[in-house]
Image (cartoon, rainbow, N blue to C red):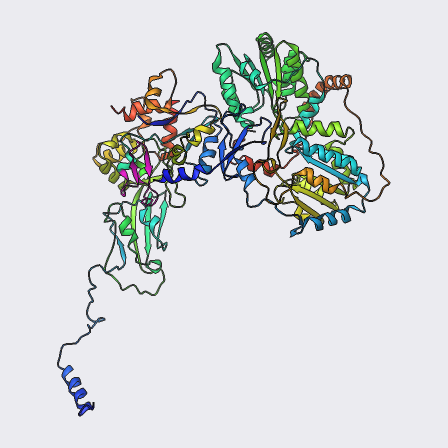
Amino acid sequence: MRIPLPKIREVIEAVGSLFSRPFTNGYPFKPLVPPDGFRGKPEYYQDECVGCLACYEVCPGRAISYEDNKETKKRTLTYRADLCIFCQQCEKACITEKGIQLTKQFELASYERKGVTSTSIKELVLCENCGEVVGCIDHLRFLARKVGPLLYTNPTLLLARHDELKLLEKERGANSPHPRAGHLKLLCPNCRREMIVKEQW
Amino acid sequence: MAKRVFLNLDLCCGCKSCAAACAYGHHLQSLLGHSQLKAAELPLHCLHCDQPACAAACPNEAMKKMADETVQRSQYRCVGCRSCSVACPFGVIQPDLAKHITPKCDLCLDRLAEGEIPRCVATCTSGALSFAEVDEQIADRNKNLISVRMLANFVGRRR
Amino acid sequence: MVADNLKVKSENSKIRNSLCLFCSLGCGVSLRDEGKALAYAQDNPVNKGALCPRGHYNLELVNHPGRLAEPQIGKRKVSWEEALTFIKQELQPFRKDEVGCLVSCLLSNEAALAVARTAQALGVKNVLTAGAAADLEAYEGNKWTVPGAELASLDHLEKSEALLIIGDILSRSPVLSRRINQVKYGKRGNQIVVIDPNQTRTTWFATDHLACRPGTEPVVLAALAGALPAEEAAAICGIAAAKLEQTAAAFRTAASGTVIYVPQSKRPRNDLGVYYVKKLAAASPNKKYLVYYLFGNTLGVNTVIDREIPDHPTYHELLGKIERGEIKSLLLFGEDISAGHEELQKKFRMLKFVVYAGYFESESPAIYDNSIILPLASQFEGGGSYVLADGSLAACEPIVPAAGSVPLEKICGLLADCKPGRNDARECVGQGPVTKAKAEAEAEGEVRAVRAAEQGPVKPITYFGNNQLVGNFFWFQVNKNG
């Protein structure tokens, strides 16, 4: 079938589109809003994160790393975008469910490979016996709230809770008149086991 | 009442053969914690508490009190957050992870299914470990049993 | 649900009994599913189901990926025919007395006999057993006859009222702890005396710990046996004379007793120790003695070799011959003693030809220019009979099909054709078996020698055996204290 005057139809289309609204958005000049469920860059929320390292354990791309500094008692969790595959495992595994969340941010180009990061810095608790890392103070407080009355079975959680409630005495342990005050200590699991076997010996 | 592993500290000679047997049964990783006391290294097992703090602390129900009154750990639910390790009142869940596994005594499920006793008890050289009913052991006050005292002190009898 | 699956699996499995040879206690070991899982022999009278960390190593011996399956020349795998032709060809230029032979103490009596007979057929006289140095030294002492000294059975040990333990028995044979506990908690007044310079697991269970100076255990034993005045001994060993006399009297007056001796490489003169242990056991009624060796069949292999080849050289004589170049070829059966032993390796490098029959490819034969490695069947594939510490004979049957490895009896049969060629063999000059009178005279003289050695420099300890393999046994660091 032969179309009459084909070029004129195209010219009319072109001239008409000069006066209609644009179909694409002017992305670099106007912000783009991704749809719901879009998996963008994960972001740490400092107040919600407890530093339990679940995100570090489940990350398949090793995009999350951590570093413990025993001198300053700080644990630094670092997310690197260049290794991330945006699988949302970290958000799924997060024990507070809000500590690390995927945002809709997708502009991750930078001049450096390690340029795009997100960090969470948490306060560490060291074992009062051996100096090893027990966990983050927020993690202990979170667990103390979560296990409810069972926290009275475990002095580590109990002390974390009392510390939060400002019930803790400044002087405890050696100077305490109580004979078994040494048991009320923030201990790592290995030291706690040793203390219990010693106590029963 | 379910059966548990008990340790008689007077008999234990600290040879760690329970740890060796455990390692052979659990992918070459011992689930027993040993504590150094003077010359001996004494094992402490998971007590399988009536109200387990590890199960309460677990975010994903990986630690669970089962119908047979043991506390078992589901490997595929675990995310490795170390909450159980921190929350355990006895420190028997080891904090160091191997292959994303938080090691935890399962009373040798495979051997129990065959009607046999757990590996650590079977291989104990000094007869210090025994696998017995909790009630029996509590009745036997003459023996200095670590687990009985702990059960009485910390967890309480379930009645 | 998991348990159900496992149950189905277990119905197909068979359990077969065998023996653990990692010390001379001889615990029963059960292997399930053709060696794929380790079970504990609950009906075995020796261990009653218990097994120490070293005993679990048995499983790795069965299905270790590094087990040899074919003969090797260096790293090259060859057929048996080619290997035998190679051995025949290489042994041709040596005289009969230029060939030495070392038999491991982990092998069975039958294997040791086969080696001895083959050596006789080949005309080789430099045959020696290879075990821990301390064990061999203790075995020398065991040969000195003391009238009235008897080996104790495990039942006697259980029922005895006094135990005298020299060394750290619970690190070497933890399975014995059940019986030691039985003595400790069995009857009021039972005594366990431990003579050890260190704080060990065994001293943990002792009612009395005699902490002597390191290396002076033979002197303490001599004092207890009455061969040395208590004052003299006290000056050497650092234990008060009154304490020694009191201990000796308590042991003498006990209704029944056992002396347990553990040879240790850090202790000089283990032979004297065993001699005085035997004297101590013979001195009072109803007292017996036990010597616990590190290698399972030390008693059996040594006895067989002593009986069959009475004029064999000692360990140091053999090494001297290798160093001087008098022995140019060596047949190593069971284990390569030079693995992890640099001085020995230096000496072994002077050898022109080495035949090594073993379970694993040793580290050191690779460095010999001309060596051949033959795959050897362990007790699980070959079976055999073993003499344990209490003198009892334990037999174990083959339970796992051998994957290419061959029992030593067969290897010896094949080697019988491979005679060293040159026939102008000189007679080896042996010293003959030690007589009773000579032994006693030597022993009395040796106390003074020990005392003299106290002032002089301490001799370096030679550990004769596969150090690395033994180190691997203690993968849970059981032997931390010595």
- The furthest residue to the front: C12
Highlighted magenta segment, given as a residue range: B57-83
Q: Which quadrant: the N terminus of chain C?
A: top left
- The furthest residue to the top: C253
- The furthest residue to the left: A19
- Residue C342 at x, y percent in the picture: 66, 41
- Residue at (85, 38) in percent of width and height: C425
The picture quadrant where one finds residue A176 is top left
Examine the rendered structure and indicate whether residue A48 appears above or below residue C250.
Answer: below
- Residue A103 at x, y percent in the picture: 24, 57
- Taking the magenta stretch, the answer to whether it contains residue C437 is no
Q: Which quadrant: the C terminus of chain C?
A: top right
- Is B57 situated left or right of C112 in this image? left
Secondary structure predominantly adopted by residues drawn in magenta: loop
- Taking the magenta stretch, the answer to whether it contains residue B62 is yes
Q: Is residue C231 visible?
A: no
- Residue C4 at x, y percent in the picture: 36, 38
- Is A45 situated left or right of C188 in this image? left
- Residue C80 at x, y percent in the picture: 68, 48
